[in-house]
Image (cartoon, rainbow, N blue to C red):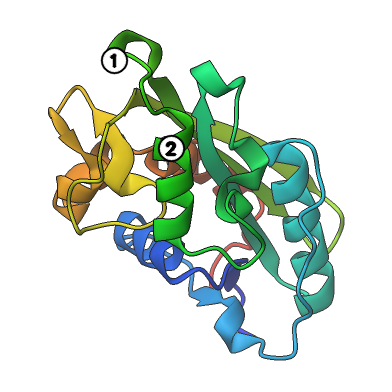
Amino acid sequence: MKRKEVVLATRNEGKLKEFKRILKDFDPDLLSLDAFPDMPEIVEDGSTFEENALKKAVTIATLTGRIAIADDSGLVVDYLGGEPGVMSARYAGQRASDEDNCRKLLHALQGVPDHLRTASFRCALALATPGGEKEVVTGECSGMITHEAKGSSGFGYDPVFYYPGYKKTFAELEPDMKDRVSHRRRAIEKILLILPHYLPRGR
């Protein structure tokens, strides 16, 4: 095992690509769960993003013997009382596609005026070590829900999340533009301040 290996506890291809873009100049060797094909599926049964991220990070760190970073993130829509929230990936059902989830969200907001369509993407990142140390940080990006899906980039709810700063949906942005302002970027910047304290010195 390389001394500075860090496991990103996800198999979500979109999240993994985003992580790797943001962390492209990062020093440790980054592994995904694809490097551990026998790793069991972790049930995300927490009531908050923080609980789910921490559960995943602690489990993966324990099973792999490596530092693990786990993400739980989703969309919080004010008009819907915070939904879809921790159910973001399963909003339209256990095996729902991104398109299914976006379609259900737009239907739930049908007829709702623009000023009531406020929403935010939220990300909780948890870091855990095999020795039991753990940290949780969060990041957030505020915007609006559109009346129709726009753009073909990104993943998840990106086609219906309008970011006022760029006057486009996340799915209309080039990946590097989204990375500058995303909720995940803001959480990763915080975790990078913490991570060096847990990495061994040298190689």
Which kind of residue does numbered mark 2 sit on? His
Against 97, is 182 above or below?
above
The location of residue 97, given as percent across then percent down, is 48, 64
Which kind of residue does numbered mark 1 sit on? Asp
Front disc: 2 or 1: 2
Q: Nearer the viewer, residue 135 or 117?
A: 117
Identify the residue shown where x is 86% and y is 60%. Answer: 131
Residue most extreme to the top: 115
> Label 2 vs label 1: CA separation?
14 Å
- Residue receiving disc 1: 114
Which mark is drawn over residue 107?
Answer: 2
The reply to whether the C-beta atoms of the residues labelled 2 and 1 are less than 8 Å apart is: no
Against 88, is 163 above or below?
above
Against 182, is 6 above or below?
below
Label 2: few (<14), some or many (≥20) within 10 Å?
few
**What is the quadrant of the C terminus in the image?**
bottom right
